Amino acid sequence: QVQLVESGGGLVQAGASLRLSCTASGPDDFSAYALGWFRQAPGKEREFVATITWSGAYTYYADSVKGRFTITRDNAKNTVYLQMNALKPEDTAVYSCAAKTSRTLVLMPHEYHYWGQGTQVTVST
């Protein structure tokens, strides 16, 4: 069983930056997992944000965050990061990380095996 714990959320003003972290416990080989970040705002469906392959060589982003957010991973630390720059009020949501044993990018939430509880990001005007 893999457990994911997110951290780094908070309340910031528009234009600020935050870095989210998601640390996994339990996997025999963290590098066997593709990882993703998703977000869900109140009253809205869960939305794909970014994903990264097992090695970190390939990434993919939602158009809404492309150029502002960066997903990276440190397999030695069992951790995936989401660097968020130039935050906007519409980025306000609960951000969750997810993991799936895969060698390819994984975009769809239903494909993921494991989920964290999420961390709140609130961006004020």
Image (cartoon, rainbow, N blue to C red):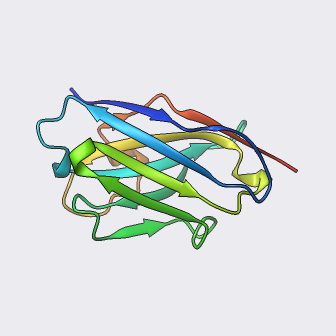
Q: Position of residue 75 (x, y in %)?
A: 23, 50
19 vs 52, left or right, is: right
Q: Residue furthest left?
A: 28
The front one of 95 and 21 is 21
36 vs 101, left or right, is: right
Q: Position of residue 25 (x, y in %)?
A: 26, 29
118 vs 77, left or right, is: right
Q: Position of residue 38 (x, y in %)?
A: 51, 47
Q: Residue furthest bottom?
A: 67
Q: Determine if residue 46 is in view.
A: no
The front one of 100 and 19 is 19
Q: Position of residue 86 (x, y in %)?
A: 70, 63
- Numbered marks: total: 0
**Quadrant where the N terminus lies?**
top left
Q: Determine if residue 50 is in view.
A: yes
Identity of the residue drawn at 54% across and 65% down: 62
Identity of the residue drawn at 35% across and 37% down: 23
**What is the quadrant of residue 122 in the picture?**
top right
Identity of the residue drawn at 33% across and 47% down: 111
Q: Residue furthest right?
A: 125
Identity of the residue drawn at 34% across and 58% down: 106
- Vertical order, 68 against 34 (above or below): below
The front one of 43 and 69 is 69
**What is the quadrant of residue 105 in the picture?**
bottom left
